[in-house]
Amino acid sequence: METNPPTSELMSPVHSFPNRFFSSDFHNDEELNAQASVYTYMPVDGSRSSEVPVRSPDVLISNKFMNSAFHDDEVMDNEQASQDSGLQFMPGAGSGSSHGPSVFAESSRDPLDGPSNPYFVFDTPQGTRYWIPNVADKFIPVCGKSYPTFEDVLSMYELYAFEAGFSVKKGQTKVWNGIPTHKYLRCSKYGKPQPKRTFDTLDESSLKPWRTNFTWCDCKASILVSISNDSYTVLSFNDIHNHELVESYNRDLSKISRKLSFSTKQFIHNMSLNRIGPMRAYRCLVALKGGHHNVNGTPVDFKNFSHQLRILLLSSVFWADEISKLNYKAFGDVLAFDATYSTNRYKMVFVPFTGVDHHFQCVAFGAGLISTESIESYVWLLKAFLKSHGTQPTLVLSDQDPSMLQAVPMVFTESHHRLCMWHIMKKLPSKISADVLDNTDLRSCIHRLVWNVYIKPETFESRWNDLLQTFGLQSHTWLNDMYNIKHLWVPACFRELPMCCLMKTTSRCESSNAAFKVNSTSANTLVQFMMCFENRVDSQRYRQRVSEYKTSSTVFTTDLAIEQHAFAIYTNAVFAQVQKEIIKGKFLCYITNQTESSDSSLLIDVTHLDKRNNITNVYQVTYNTVDHSASCSCRNFTRIGYLCRHVFCVYRLKNVAKIPPQYINDRWRRDALPKQVFSLSSRYGVNPHAPSVMRNEILDLVTECVDVARTDEDSLSKLVDQLRDFKINVLSKQPLGTIQNETNECEMEEIVGQPINIPVEVANPEVVRNKGCGTHTRISGPGEKAKAKPPKRPKQLRLCKRCGLYVDDHDSRNCVKVAAMKAAKAAAEQQRQTAPGASPSD
């Protein structure tokens, strides 16, 4: 056998190879066993240069090695395994052999284009073409090298395959007396080509060919691994392919590169929670990573994983929220809830429970999903809410839904139920003529009247009658109906209720409810919707945390000590309102009369001025000189929870430096919520596990390094080299390629945060129809109605690999289930026909 390096004669493009260069086990035996053959050998690269190293002709492929043409995962019998276990391999049996230097020198590579000569091609006289990859020596498998585990061998060969431009699959295993002795790793194109299917092209319902861009060509490129004493040794290596290899600039389209990484899957999932589909997620990732070649997978792969994740989520329902209970404990005196539609694929009604926190921002107390808007459904939902939180709210706000009007008093027996004014005022354009609303100031007059919290019920009634008479609406049906239920929605009619003025703030809850629909779509499953809801709640709590952080500094506008005391007590949002009352109490209010009602009590009349210094009203303040308690006839503290300008006017003249404790409402304090609400462990979307935290830290560190060295080419080059070496080191310990089904499921479990193999006791709900679902119909024109509808396209027949038939009603995944259903239906039909008294026409 010749083991010398290639001579100058072999460097020529056309030369003669000895017959022993090829095995007689390729596809065409007659072609490869010719006694004298001339082979055309050519290098392949972008520049078509001929000044490249070529394959040495002294590399032999063992006949027995090439004869092992088994299918994947096929187990050989003992006799055949004993014959193959004694293979005698020649010293130069592969390009990775340890005998003699390799003829492939490691060449400099461009980061995008790979080696200057990615592979070599040679043709036989009969026209058969073969490809040999040209990779660096450090990636080429070495015959005789041992590895501690099979995963290490797989990782080594996958790394070589990635550099060479092909994919790997596990081949057959040789077994002796039940013990595996040899294992093959092969090119993914190994295997006999499938025979072409025949069909009638004139028949519309006949079988159509299944389109695919992957074919098997029985490629013999592989390595054989010997298994003995818990070690895995590379026995032989064949790097000759009978198919074209993937170019370096197309590596991102190869099978192994299309495998979605965990970070990519997590990115798709996070985008779906913000109502961004897989196609837009793909385009965003392409923009972030600087090109399609830097993204694992194609748009089809993104859509496939999104579909798999959607199916998985149907069996992984979980919902728990302790932060909502803490929010309700602090701010649950006023509760607003409303029904929202088109948030899930089952058309179930979404009912969020919302309140107002100490920053005058909306806060979620929970959420519910009901199938019908019946009294029973709302009663069950409110009982579940009460069971979760334990206490009833002081004031409950809802819209005019008849079921809500009856369900709330049945459950919240200690609460006051009122209607949300925002919903009523929203109906003005649909109830009153547009000519009247657009050409008069009726809208502004109604708003000024109903939102006035300082007037008494008698004043409201007289002003309402004057307004209707002014615009000639005394006989308007809807306005009269609203007047008859004024005690349910006009603040002036229930001004004695605590915190009733928060009705003005809860009008923003409707916009918060609409924001939940921004993250969710009508195609989401229930669990997907709940995850989108959690994502929206996380954004809501982020704004709450930002407001909490900003409650640290302000600008004082007066020299009063009570203003500084108010700043130390309240949050910034509440202090801004209290500060206005203090300023107006100093500049727009003055005392006109003061009398003693007892030894320690004073009755003080305070005149209220407007911005033009015109007297608007006079209020009476009862002041106690002992404990500095005060009550005003305007009832501002009862309605909103902090003192009014009239009391601050009295405190200024009486030199009261601090707000009395009995007038500090706990819901407006800075420390209304415990600090644990804002911790990382209490946030949605934050994975507290150490691997996740370290992954995020690595991304931040790499990003910071790139930002700092973005203009320094030397630093960037060093960083790339270090990361590339680290990648090779990591890939040498863990396989890069084919991910098994359980691995994919484990990744989805980690993304979703819940196990998938858990018993499911709740079935998917049926699709329901409610008043908010819409008709989803479009008015058809006369041309569309006259046009005949084309016949439906027949279903395409597909091969079921389980039963071996071409069918259109099932596949290999549900073959057994469909067959059982058909058998049960046939048995029921037979039993019905054979039953006594049954007639053939039944």
Image (tube, helix red, strand yellow):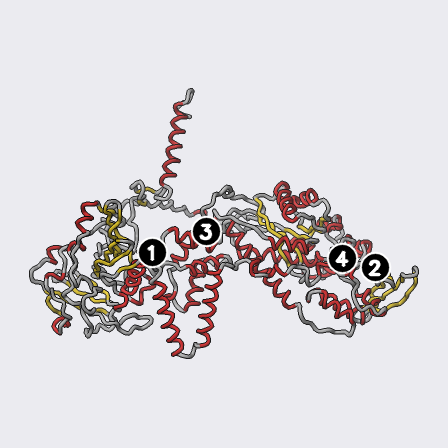
- Cα gap from disc 1 to disc 3, whole angstroms: 23 Å
- Cα gap from disc 2 to disc 4, whole angstroms: 12 Å
Q: Can residue 432 be spotted in the picture? A: no
Q: Which residue is mark 3?
A: 310
- The correct choice, above or below, for 396 with respect to 616 in the image is above
Where's residue 586, x and y in %? 81, 71
Q: Which residue is mark 1?
A: 738
Local SS, label 3: helix
Q: The N terminus is located in which quarter?
A: bottom left
Q: Is residue 695 left or right of residue 47?
A: right
Q: Residue at x 65, y 49 (%)?
A: 389
Local SS, label 2: loop
Q: Quadrant of residue 714?
A: bottom left
Dot in front, 1 or 4: 1
| Mark found first going from the N terminus, 1 or 2 | 2
| Mark found first going from the N terminus, 1 or 3 | 3
